[in-house]
Image (spheres, helix red, strand yellow):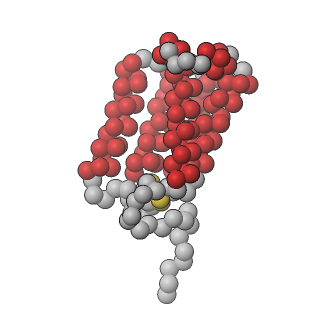
């Protein structure tokens, strides 16, 4: 993973955040769902876990600078069961944290996270694996910035995955 890859993903994420801050129609009211404090915590910790996993594999020297991470880095880089758990748990945390969001976003996110896991462990070409990481990161950012509302948002939105039937 190159620095340019990381910068490109950061640029896409930053662009989505800027759009969220400057476009009045975002998040999209028809699809917006408020995150609970637990949803926000799960999503945040899950994303940090995914970043830890990727950084341990591609930027080992950076993660090594964090005290106590040596064993974690070794487990992740072993590409065995422990590595799979270190990937699957944060991925599931992200999906759980965003579970109230639009079902299409969840299907795309679930498929992207699954593709990251499959391409990581089945010997797929690195470029394909990086493409899936880029897609998953972009979908997480798009879901958070374009569809979700923070727990402290006062704007009323529906907080259910399924809308109630329209009144006649």
45 is higher (above) or lower (below) than 81: below
Please give left or right for residue 93 compared with residue 158 in the image. right
Up-down relation of residue 152 to residue 72 (above or below) = below
> In which quarter of the view is residue 76 placed?
top right
Depth check, front residue: 28 or 37: 37
The answer to whether residue 31 is visible is yes
| Front-most of residues 79 and 67 | 67
Q: Is residue 44 above or below residue 100?
A: above
Given residues 72 and 11, the one toward you in this image is: 72
Going by the image, does 41 lie left or right of 4?
right
Q: Considering only vertical position in the picture, is 84 above or below 108?
A: above
Compared across the picture, whether 163 is left or right of 15 comes to right
Q: Residue furthest right?
A: 81
Residue under the point 33% across and 32% down: 11
Which residue lies most toward the bottom here?
A: 168
Say which quarter of the image contains residue 2: top left
Single out the residue that lies furthest toward the front: 67
**Residue 4 x, y percent position in the rendering:** 37, 20
Q: Position of residue 155 (x, y in %)?
A: 38, 65
**The residue positioned farthest toward the top in the image shown:** 61
Residue 138 drawn at (x, y percent): 44, 38
Which residue is depicted at the point 44% across and 66% down?
157
In the image, what residue occupies the spot 55% across and 63% down?
161
Q: Residue at x 31, y 39 (%)?
A: 15
Q: Position of residue 59 (x, y in %)?
A: 49, 16
Q: Is residue 118 left or right of residue 55?
A: right
């Amino acid at each position: 993973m190159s620095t340019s890859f990381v910068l490109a993903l950061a640029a896409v994420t930053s662009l989505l955040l800027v759009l969220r801050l400057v476009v009045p129609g975002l998040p999209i009211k028809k699809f917006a769902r408020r995150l609970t404090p637990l949803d926000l915590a799960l999503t945040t910790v899950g994303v940090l876990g995914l970043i830890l996993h990727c950084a341990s594999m591609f930027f080992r020297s950076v993660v090594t600078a964090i005290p106590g991470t040596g064993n974690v880095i070794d487990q992740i880089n072993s590409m065995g069961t422990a590595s799979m758990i270190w990937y699957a748990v944060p991925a599931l945390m992200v999906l759980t944290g965003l579970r109230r969001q639009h079902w299409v976003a969840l299907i795309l996110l679930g498929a992207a996270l699954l593709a990251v896991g499959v391409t990581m462990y089945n010997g797929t070409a690195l470029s394909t694996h990086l493409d899936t990481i880029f897609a998953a990161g972009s979908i997480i950012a798009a879901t958070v910035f374009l569809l979700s509302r923070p727990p402290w948002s006062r704007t009323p939105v529906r907080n259910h995955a399924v809308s109630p039937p329209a009144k006649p």
